[in-house]
Amino acid sequence: MADMTLEMVQASQLGMKALGAGIAVGLTGIATGIAEMSIGSAAVGATAENKDIFGLALLFTVIPETIVIFGLVVALLLLF
């Protein structure tokens, strides 16, 4: 009986870790999408006016994607 209870607790803990990892990646993905929504439209508008700032606009568009990488790192730390 005690072995079964221990297995249930371990399975519950593993499930909560997986849920936390999923929330970490999911919320950071949503936040990145919201951030890139405004940055991307501004970058396209700025590039349409001045073609010389394409590289800078591209850099500003890529910066929010690091948030998802941080979420993935947190998820991996939770699971392993």
Image: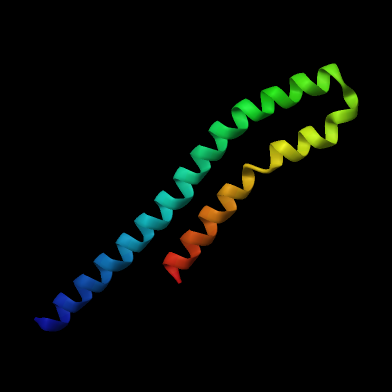
Q: Which residue is drawn at 43% across and 67% down?
A: 79
Tell me the quarter of the picture where residue 9 sits.
bottom left
| Along the viewing direction, whichever of 42 and 14 lies nearer the viewer | 42
Q: Looking at the picture, how far across and down is residue 4, in whole percent? A: 15, 77
Q: Which residue is drawn at 11% across and 82% down?
A: 2
Q: Looking at the picture, how far across and down is residue 74, in whole percent? A: 48, 60
Taking the view exactly as shown, the residue that stands out farthest to the top is 49
Task: Answer above or below: position of 23 versus 59.
Answer: below
Relative to residue 12, is residue 30 drawn left or right? Answer: right
Relative to residue 25, is residue 4 drawn left or right? Answer: left
Q: In which quarter of the image is the C terminus?
A: bottom left
Taking the view exactly as shown, the residue that stands out farthest to the right is 52
Task: Answer above or below: position of 22 versus 33.
Answer: below
Q: Looking at the picture, how far across and down is residue 75, in whole percent? A: 47, 60
Q: Which residue is drawn at 35% across and 55% down?
A: 19
Q: Looking at the picture, how far across and down is residue 39, in whole percent? A: 65, 29
Q: In which quarter of the image is the N terminus?
A: bottom left
Tell me the quarter of the picture where residue 52 sits.
top right
Q: Residue at x 68, y 23 (%)?
A: 41
Task: Answer above or below: position of 33 versus 20.
Answer: above
Total numbered labels placed on residues in the image: 0
Task: Answer above or below: position of 69 versus 6.
Answer: above
Which coloring applies here?
Answer: rainbow
